[in-house]
Amino acid sequence: MNRKSFRIVAGLPILLSVSIGVVLLGSGCKRASSAAAPRATHSGSRLPDNVELSKTPGVSIIQCPVGDYRTDRIQGDGYSGSGEAVTATIESVIFRWAQVTGWIRIDAVLPDARYNIRVVGDEDNNVWSRVKPAFEDVFGIRFVEGMEPTDAVVIQKPQGEVAGLIRVEAKSNWGTAQTPGGLGYKADSASMAELARIVGKYVDEPVLDETALDGNYQFELAMDTFKPATVFPAVENLGLKLVREKRNLNITRVVSAETEDRAP
């Protein structure tokens, strides 16, 4: 996985949840005893399969053999006392459990493998506070946070009424559905922040809601989810605009420890 990835975190758990254990019955790989936990010599290197990799108390990391993967499952969030990831990628676990303000950008080359990860916290240590140092040690990565001028996709509202949005008083309810544009999205009730989250699935940049539209709305996003570029005209058909502009954003970069050590 050498692409650069942006995901919004905004100080909140990333839209998923879970709990954890020690021996993962029915998972894609099994636990094997090991006297010493190996460490990656550089991010992206392949580690031994079926061996406990973590030396961090309360954290178990076991790499699954190639081809022995099943549907990934991640339970719990970074605030939880415990969490479990089954046959999951490191990238997906970071995006699920990371507790940072702003956006995460993956610059390091993460291992092209899947893992069974179990975290057991306590009153003083949640999932993220335990798994972060474990990831840094095992995978040779670092989490570096700072404000950066960043290319972003901004949702804006032109002057006047927005014909494609109907204000509703209802709990959030939206998902994929067949639309005139293909497999798109229908929202019985969704906020502009949720629209930004949808758009973020189909662009490489962070997506910002600058519409100043509060509350929830009913709308249909007539796009083709198999053709990411169709999200732009679909949003414009709602009466909104998507523009690419620079913004000063809080970014947490996931970098190789070797790269960080070489930085001036």
Image (cartoon, rainbow, N blue to C red):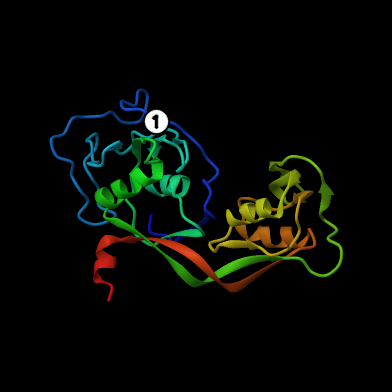
Q: Position of residue 123 (x, y in %)?
A: 39, 36
Q: Position of residue 239 (x, y in %)?
A: 80, 62
Residue at the extreme front = 123
Q: Quadrant of residue 70?
A: top left
Q: Position of residue 204 (x, y in %)?
A: 53, 62
Query: In this orientation, which residue lies closer to the viewer: 174 or 192?
Result: 192
Residue at 16% across / 34% down in the picture? Answer: 34
Residue at 74% across / 40% down in the picture? Answer: 171
SS of the residue under disc 1: loop
Q: Is residue 257 above or below residue 72?
A: below
Q: Is residue 62 left or right of residue 18?
A: left
Residue of label 1: 20
Q: Is residue 241 left or right of residue 23?
A: right
Identify which amino acid the numbered label 1 is placed on: Ile
Query: In this orientation, which residue lies closer to the viewer: 26 or 127?
Result: 127
Residue at the extreme top = 25
Q: Is residue 34 above or below residue 138?
A: above
Quarter that holds the N terminus:
bottom left
Residue at 27% across / 61% down in the picture? Answer: 257
Q: Is residue 208 above or below residue 53?
A: below
Crowdedness near tag 1: few (<14), some (14–19) or many (≥20) residues, C-alpha within 10 Å: many
Quarter that holds the C terminus:
bottom left
Query: In this orientation, which residue lies closer to the viewer: 79 or 35?
Result: 79
